[in-house]
Amino acid sequence: RAFDVPSATGRPSSKRRVRWDSKDLPSWVALLNEHVSRFEERVEMLLRASDKIDVAIDAIESAVYDRVKFAEAVENVQKIVDELSLAGYSDLSSWVETVNEKMGVVLGRRLEEALVAWAETFEIAEGDGADDEANQKKKRDRKKLVKIPKISVEIMLKNQEISAQPAVPTARALFLDALHDYVGIVC
């Protein structure tokens, strides 16, 4: 075995000395060449996988905030890791931990952006409606706002008692369910 690549013969390698004038030199060189070639192939496969992972993580970072898009990007990462696992790479778990940390940072950033967008959806525009630069920016950013389901609340005054239909806790629960669904896109 060389670099976790089993030899073609299947037997463990042993240390031995080979003289330059030995008859075994050509077979030893051929075996060494085979090991080096396998090692190069595996390194190239790892480099391609690393590049694919970087592209997939970038896709997660720039994907439209949609459940399907996130699922596809995360699925691509999982496919790459599965391919490496099936190829029998050793110490794959430490590399996967590094990938998980990168993905955690990106997903955390996307979740933070989503929560900010959720909060900005409820902000009331202040000012007298003048078209200054800040208002222009707010108008452009409104396109990124979250679509929150409208809840019709009927306020009734009956026998000097004010009531709301649906009740405030029910309306709150509906908004929290919508928030949970929205956050669940990333999670």
Image (cartoon, rainbow, N blue to C red):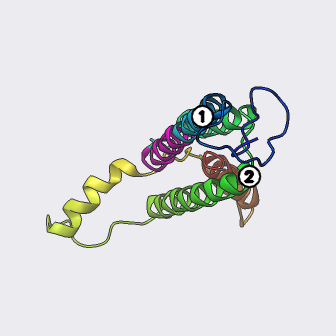
Magenta stretch secondary structure, dominant:
helix
* Residue denoted by label 1: 29
Quadrant location of the N terminus in the rendered image:
top right
Position of residue 131 measured from the top left corner of the image (x, y, whole percent): 14, 64
Residue at image location 56% in from the left, 62% down from the top: 105
Residue at disc 2, secondary structure: loop
- Numbered marks: total: 2
Position of residue 163 measured from the top left corner of the image (x, y, whole percent): 72, 60
* Residue denoted by label 2: 91
- For this view, does 3 lie left or right of residue 122? right
Closer-to-camera residue (21/118): 21
Residue 53 part of the magenta-drawn span? yes
Residue at disc 1, secondary structure: helix
Magenta stretch bounds: 46-62
Q: Amino acid at mark 2?
A: Asp
Q: Amino acid at mark 1?
A: Val
